[in-house]
């Protein structure tokens, strides 16, 4: 019988435990700590099998999470693992997939090359910010969609929801949910002025008296969502619920969003957060088994 080991990195402990429970696979204990100077130490406390799955999200602190992941992968390769599946529920550095201005580093490409060098033989991630990052890899890449579990949650918790994308880029997510729930959707026009400033232009939206649900892939500073909530309120929405796949939620984003009077912020657990209402453990378990 082939034993599949699941290894949970520091940033995805709970998720890795849930995935191993779903699959009845063995969770390998890992010792991770830092030396007094801040450098990282990794040790697998069990024998390494031929097939291994490592789960490590790479939101803040991105650099530390990636460094730990690279150490784990290279160590697995050296210790004899032949099939090393890597699950990165939130793919950090995925937003710099192009050289937008001359001289910029294409961070996503470097990360892809380092993952392969370290030993990854297959990658799984959930809703890349830009799906084109897949092209940087030579190994198989599986992009999973969190829209079905998010749609399920909305169906069970919100009556007759109208799904709203806060910008055109998120419209395909709104449409994916709408096609599952058979409900209405719309989107707003957004312009990003700087990394933490966005301007959202009002369109005519038909949300008067409706229970609205905003869907975005990422909530980072919360600027996009705050603008969208204010617009929905000005259009007399009955309630506004905010949903996202990846709760990056930097600084006081949660406070800023709740201060607008939203009903709730719901997210998946690709990144650990108080907003995690939906687990993607079954989605991952199903993909890697
Ligand atoms: C942008 O294209 C993304 O889909 C999100 O809308 C964006 O990352 C959210 O950023 P923030 O919360 O800082 O407005």
Image (spheres, rainbow, N blue to C red):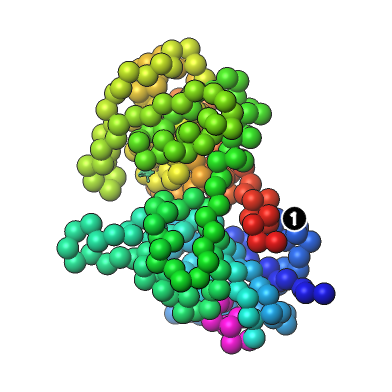
Q: Quick check: can you spot residue 256?
A: no
**Left or right: 16 as drawn, with respect to 185:** right
Residue placed most toward the observer, 157 or 171: 171
Q: Residue furthest left?
A: 102
Q: Quick check: can you spot residue 8?
A: yes
Instruction: Find residue 156 and report its horizontal and vertical position in percent.
Output: 66, 29
Q: Is residue 61 magenta?
A: no
Quarter that holds the C terminus: bottom right
Instruction: Find residue 261 and report its horizontal and vertical position in percent.
Output: 45, 25
Q: Is residue 246 above or below residue 150?
A: below
Q: Secondary structure at mark 1?
A: helix
**Left or right: 203 as drawn, with respect to 15:** left
Q: Main secondary structure of the magenta part?
A: helix
Q: Is residue 223 above or below residue 69?
A: above
Q: Is mark 1 within 8 Å of ligand 1?
A: no
**Left or right: 151 as drawn, with respect to 241:** right
Q: Residues within 10 Å of mark 1 (few under 14, many from 20)?
A: some
Which contiguous range is marked in magenta?
72-79
- Assign ligand 1 to one image quadrant: top left
Q: Is residue 78 magenta?
A: yes
Q: Which residue is identified by label 1?
A: 22
Instruction: Find residue 47 and report its horizontal and vertical position in percent.
Output: 72, 82
Instruction: Find residue 29 and report its horizontal and vertical position in percent.
Output: 70, 72
**Residue at figure coordinates x 22%, y 42% from the top left:** 193
**Residue at figure coordinates x 49%, y 16% from the top left:** 210
Q: How many marks can you see? A: 1
Residue placed most toward the observer, 200 or 10: 200
Q: Is residue 112 above or below residue 148?
A: below
**Residue at figure coordinates x 57%, y 19% from the top left:** 160
**Residue at figure coordinates x 79%, y 61% from the top left:** 24
Quarter that holds the N terminus: bottom right
């Amino acid at each position: 019988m082939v034993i599949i080991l699941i290894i949970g990195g520091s940033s995805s402990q709970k998720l890795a435990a849930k995935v191993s429970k779903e699959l009845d696979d063995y969770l390998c204990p890992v010792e991770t700590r830092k030396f007094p100077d801040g450098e990282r130490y990794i040790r697998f406390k069990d024998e390494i099998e031929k097939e291994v799955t490592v789960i490590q999200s790479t939101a803040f602190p991105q650099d530390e999470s990636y460094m730990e992941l690279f150490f784990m992968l290279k160590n697995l390769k050296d210790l004899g693992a032949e099939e090393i599946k890597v699950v990165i529920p939130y793919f950090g550095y995925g937003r710099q997939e192009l050289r937008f201005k001359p001289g910029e580093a294409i961070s996503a490409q470097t990360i892809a090359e380092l993952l392969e060098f370290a030993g990854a033989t297959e990658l799984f991630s959930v809703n890349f910010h830009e799906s084109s990052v897949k092209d940087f890899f030579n190994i198989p890449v599986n992009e999973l969609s969190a829209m079905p579990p998010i749609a399920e949650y909305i169906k069970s918790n919100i009556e007759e929801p109208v799904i709203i994308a806060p910008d055109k880029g998120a419209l395909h997510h709104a449409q994916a949910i709408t096609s599952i729930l058979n409900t209405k959707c719309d989107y707003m026009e957004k312009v990003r002025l700087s990394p933490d400033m966005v301007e959202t232009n009002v369109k005519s939206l038909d949300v008067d008296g409706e229970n609205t649900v905003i869907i975005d892939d990422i909530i980072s500073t919360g600027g996009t969502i705050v603008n969208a909530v204010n617009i929905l309120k000005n259009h007399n929405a009955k309630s506004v619920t905010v949903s996202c796949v990846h709760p990056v939620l930097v600084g006081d984003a949660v406070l800023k969003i709740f201060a607008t009077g939203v009903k709730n912020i719901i997210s998946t657990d690709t990144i650990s957060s108080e907003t995690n209402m939906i687990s993607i453990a079954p989605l991952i378990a199903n993909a890697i088994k």
